[in-house]
Amino acid sequence: MEYDQSLLLFMGTTGVSNYAKLPSWTPDSSNSNVISEIATWERYEASRNSKTSFHFSTDEQVLYVQGAVIDSIVTTHTEFADFPSCKDVHTFIQQLCMHLSPDICQEDYVALLMALFDKAWKAGHQAFPSLRNVIRRFLGLVSETVLGKGLAEAKFFAHNEMSKRLDRKVLFRTTQGRLGFSSQHISPDDAVVLLSGCKLPMIIRSDGEAWRIVAPAFVHSDGIMEGGLWKDDIELQEFGFFEKIAVTR
């Protein structure tokens, strides 16, 4: 972090570690079955072009970062299975459909899934059917005749990409009614924050008078991923992240 003055290290955090003394902001590189990243760092600008701002305490036990709380998690839903399990298309569809519940707005859920995969979809697959229709087909909301040409290839590509991104992720709802995805290790009452110089929203957890990093998040509402809530006059506070991670598995 000090070498490149970047918070890129946060991208690999999942809220879990094999080592109790590993800092919460440091990914566990010993884990060969690590949860996949929720989004690509370079594709988003949640804090716009803000300058990275952090420093360590004199004893190097606390990392201080500037940012702002924008929301908090009120509910988490059933987690998605791991990538190998979701490679089975029937398991994958079952996992997607389990979130079609009365307490989740169907259109908001579809919009979140679309936003999560839109950039990958547009990267080189312009001939595919509408991503919205492919997702709605997986959810059983439209018939296959709506998709038309390119259905088989489109479904294969979408299934593969979505399975990777949703690997052991959990759908969450915030106090302000936003939907998002993050690591399965997040919990209700965790805070959703924007940190100066951090390209993705982060989930952090109160630990007494300090905080700890849990994991990056993807939140579609209000243009958050493109910096929609990072205003010029945003009121920043300093978060102190203690070195030791609180959860080990």
Image (cartoon, grey):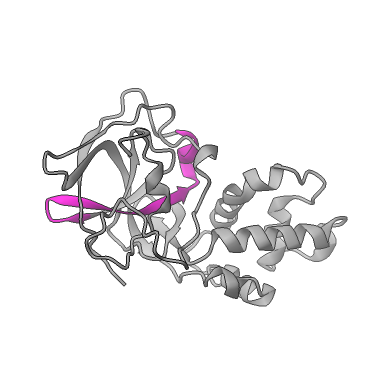
* Magenta region: 206-227
Against 37, is 156 above or below?
A: below
Residue at x-position 65% and y-position 66%: 139
In this view of the protein, which residue sits in the foreground, 104 or 192?
Answer: 192
In this view of the protein, which residue sits in the foreground, 47 or 8?
Answer: 8
Q: Is residue 165 visible?
A: yes
In this view of the protein, which residue sits in the foreground, 82 or 230?
Answer: 82
Residue 216 position, x and y percent, is: 40, 50
- Residue furthest to the right in view is 149
Residue at x-position 36% and y-position 63%: 75
Q: Is residue 177 visible?
A: no
Residue 156 position, x and y percent, is: 75, 62
Residue 126: in magenta span = no
Residue 63 position, x and y percent, is: 21, 43
Against 143, is 233 above or below?
A: above
**Which quadrant holds residue 189?**
bottom left
Residue at x-position 63% and y-position 43%: 119
Quarter of the image containing the C terminus? Answer: bottom left
Relative placement, left or right, of 117 versus 179 is right
Residue 18 position, x and y percent, is: 32, 68
**Which quadrant holds residue 20?**
bottom left
Quarter of the image containing the N terminus? Answer: top left
Against 10, is 226 above or below?
A: above
Relative placement, left or right, of 114 versus 41 is right
Relative placement, left or right, of 88 versus 61 is right
Residue 226: in magenta span = yes
